[in-house]
Structure formats: C-alpha cells, structure tokens
Image: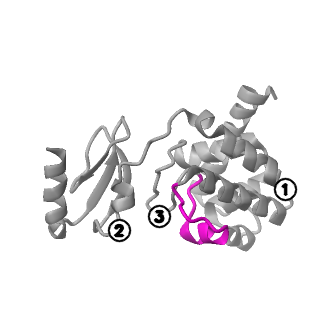
Amino acid sequence: MKLLLLGLLLTAHSAFADVYIYQGPNGERMISDRPVAGYQLVTKRDTITNTGHILANRPIETGGPTAFKHHIRRASNQYGVDAALIEAVIQIESGFNPNAVSKKGATGLMQLMSATASQYAVRDRFDPRQNINAGVQHLRHLIDRFDGEIILVLAAYNAGAGAVEKHRGVPPYPETKRYISKVLNMHTHYRKLRYGS
C-alpha cells in the first residue's frame, strides 16, 4: 500500500504546488502534497526531482551524542575543539539527526551547506563521520579567525563569518542571538553531564 501510494504521488508530482518529505517515529520516510501532523518535516520542495537520497530507506541512528561519540572524540582531538562544544552545536543544529535537511539546504548532523562541505572535501553530507569532521574543521577555522571568542565563532557558524565581520560583532539577527544562547546553554549542560565542569 505504501509503495502504491508513493508511486501514485510520484506519477502525479507535476500537479503538486509543494512536496513535503516527513520522517516518522521509527525513521520511515513519507512524501506528501500537504502538511502531516505527527511527523517531523525533513524538507519541503516544489518538485520531487533529486530527492531520492532523502526518500531512501537509510538507517536512522539514535541515542544522541553517544551514537556519534567516536566521531566527535576523534574530530575533537584532531582539531583541538572542545567535545562538549561540538555536541552542543550538533544538538542545536540537527538534534543529532544525521538525515536533517534545513529549509536553506543545510544537511546532516552539523548542518553543512554545500559550499562548506566542498571546502572540506565532503563527498556525502549525510555521512556522520564526514559531516562531523568537516563541521569541526570549520569550527576550528572560525576559532582561529575570531581569536577563540566563542560567541563570535557561534555567530559566524550560524550567520556566516562575513556577517560577523561586517557588523564587527554578533549580527543583529534575532535567530543568531537565539542560536548563540541555545548553544552556550547546551555546552554548559554537556560539560556538566560528561566532564563534571
């Protein structure tokens, strides 16, 4: 029945004004022509073209930071970035969902944009190891660029380094200010939870 429904939807896709792709509680993917309550929106598009990788039955990893602990620890050690900060960024960016896709096209655990992924030679933005490695490299780059000022680093991760430099500090974007606050709070939480400080 699900395959028949998907087939009908794919056949009639040209009639859709919008295409919604949702994820259910067990990791299953669903495509619809209208909002669906009780499912998490993965992405909304105006066509189903190039959505195969999103609709694919890829395994859903769960368990929060522990599911990706080895990737986080390796990247933390390699690039000298606090593991608790990495966990906090991932929590706020994607909620530890490796298949997350934002409205702007940012993808994976650390919500990499295509240009950022290319900068760090990422072949598959949905791959947790590659995504975390590139995201942490980018954090390291921003830490160096903004002399270790974490508030500016987080502002740049959210709004772009150019916006931080243009405004000579945190850009006056409500979203960016909320983002910084959330990541800092989560960073404190993970430091206490895992590292006792």
Q: Residues within 10 Å of mark 2 (few under 14, many from 20)?
A: few
Q: CA distance from mark 2 to mark 1?
A: 39 Å
Q: Is residue 2 left or right of residue 26?
A: left
> What secondary structure prevails in the magenta region?
loop
Instruction: Say the numbered circle drawn on residue 93.
Output: none
> Looking at the rendering, which quadrant does residue 127 occupy?
bottom right
Q: Estimate the x, y position of residue 181 in percent, counting from the top left.
A: 66, 45
Residue 148's label in the rendered image is 1
The percent coordinates of residue 96 (x first, y second) are: 55, 42
Q: Secondary structure at mark 1?
A: loop
Callout 3, which amino acid? Gly
The crowd level at tag 1 (other Cα within 10 Å; few <14, some 14-19, many 20+) is few
Please tell me whether residue 98 belongs to the stretch shown in magenta: no
Residue at 71 percent across and 73 percent down: it is 166
Q: Residue placed at 61% from the left, 46% from the top?
A: 90
The residue carrying mark 3 is: 105
Query: Horizontal placement of 178 versus 101: left or right?
Result: right
- Which span is picked out in magenta? 110-126
| Amino acid type indicated by mark 1 | Gly
Residue 133 spot, x, y in % from top left: 68, 55
